[in-house]
Amino acid sequence: MENFTFQSPTQFIFGSDTHKRVGKYVAQCGGKRALVLYGGGSVLRSGVLHEVLDSLDAAGVDCVTLGGVQPNPGSSFVYQAIEAAREAQVDFLLAVGGGSVIDTAKAVALGTPYAGDFLDFFRGKPATEALPVGVVLTIPAAGSEGSPNTVITDEENKIKKGTKADCLRPRFAVLNPELTFTLPKYQSACGISDMMSHILERYFTKTPDNAVTDRMCEAVLLAVKDVAMRVIIDSEDYQAQAALMWAGMLAHNNICGVGREQDWASHALAHQLSALFDSAHGAALAVIFPAWMRYCLDEDVERFARLAANVWEVPAGDDKRQMALAGIERYQEFLRGLGLPTKLEHLDVPEEAIPQLVELLVAANGPTVGNFKKLTAADAEAIYRLAL
Ligand code: NZQ
Ligand code: ZN
């Protein structure tokens, strides 16, 4: 285990009807005038936005609203929202939605007090100052409600990339599993793929001796695996949605990842699919992660075999490589069973796009990505081809 510092100051307010008290939490954080961001309309149709605005009003918090954040959120909307935030002189950002809305709120929180281009922070400038962000979560998936990260597509250069800073961790996150009842099956499945990927990016490490976090990773993966199909069958299964909502947060606030080198190559490869083809994030990961696993298997066969046994219930045997491959196969079957794509063609990504995907990957991340195996451009190309 390596040395680390870990700070997770977000207050989580979990349970039925909690979003109706959100005004109180904004006020407790000192928010007097909030920019309320939301997506393409699901929170209007469900009535959630209306209830949130009522709660802000009851708590004496002024607000302006701005809807229209798209999945795989882009830079042009962020510029527009920064203008709106400055014009209205807001002192708080409230995201009502999923990862795309939360990440947009975080980017706006960085960009509003900054005189330069907010994308500077996505090109290496350290972030130290941001307006406070609060969250009402509507989909268990990205884990942005507890993470210090934000991921935005630079639309001009077609690069999807993240940045992180502790000042971006939300002040609070309201987690009401009932708000997920309106989720389409495909979005739930994408969320499940994403949260499992967040654990796997941490699980595949060369750092030795992670007795606690290895077990935590396996436990969260098992829990997600156990309840996943329940929300696909019945989106109103409160207890299953509740388990996923907490798992999605645990998968990515880094409590399962401290003290170990992490990989993140699969995310980098998946991001370029989203940047070029607008693939849903979790769907892109469902295609890329199993291909990455097959390609990197021989880096540490024991680790793959352990995952196969402890999470995918592959019987122990003498041939660890066989066990490892069976585990990858079971993971892929599980993803398929949720209705997710498992090949690039399912995402309408043609073979001819691979050179451009690799070029953009290098432009976004430099000559190598990942740590478990440092992938060169040639490795990345081979993984995209394995996913065909
Ligand atoms: O836009 P609306 O109409 O709200 O519809 C959304 C959207 O179409 C819909 N949805 C959300 N909640 C709903 C609902 N529909 C019905 N009922 C509800 N309760 O779901 C669609 C997807 O929403 P989105 O916010 O894009 O989903 P998700 O939470 O999966 O976020 C994905 C984004 O997060 C980034 C991804 O790259 C992607 O851009 N990530 C952010 C991370 C972070 N900040 O820490 C980490 C992740 O690795 C990830 O990269
Ligand atoms: Zn992710």
Image: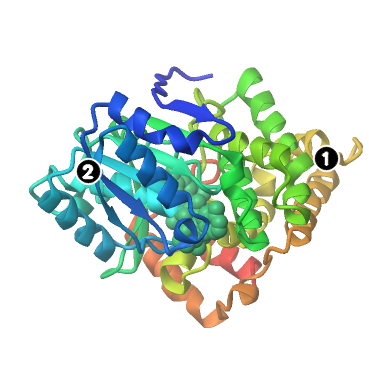
| Kind of residue indicated by mark 2 | Leu
Spot occupied by residue 297 in the image (x, y as percentages of width and height): 69, 48
At label 2, counting other C-alpha atoms closer than 10 Å, the crowd grade (few under 14, some 14-19, many 20 or more) is many
Relative to 131, 290 lies left or right: right
Question: Which residue is located at x 78 percent, y 37 percent?
Answer: 311
Closer to the camera in the image, 331 or 87: 87
The earlier-in-sequence mark between 2 and 1 is 2
Quadrant hosting residue 125? top left
Closest to the observer: 71 or 254? 71
Residue 289 appears in the figure: no
Identified at 67% across, 67% down, the residue is 341
Q: Which residue is at the front of the view, 86 or 359? A: 86
| Location of residue 77 in the rendering, given as x and y in whole percent from the top left corner | 27, 63
Residue 134 lies left or right of residue 84; in this view the side is right
Figure quadrant of the C terminus: bottom right
Asked if the residue at tag 1 contacts the one at tag 2, i.e. Cβ–Cβ closer than 8 Å, the answer is no
Q: Which residue is mark 1?
A: 320
Question: Residue 76 in the image: x percent, y percent?
Answer: 25, 65
Cβ of disc 2 within 8 Å of ligand 1?
no
Q: Which mark is residue 152?
A: none
Residue hosting label 2: 110
Q: Amino acid at mark 1?
A: Lys
Query: Going by the image, does 197 lie left or right of 10?
Result: right
Q: Where does the image place residue 386, in percent across and percent down from the top left?
A: 65, 66
Disc 1 element: helix
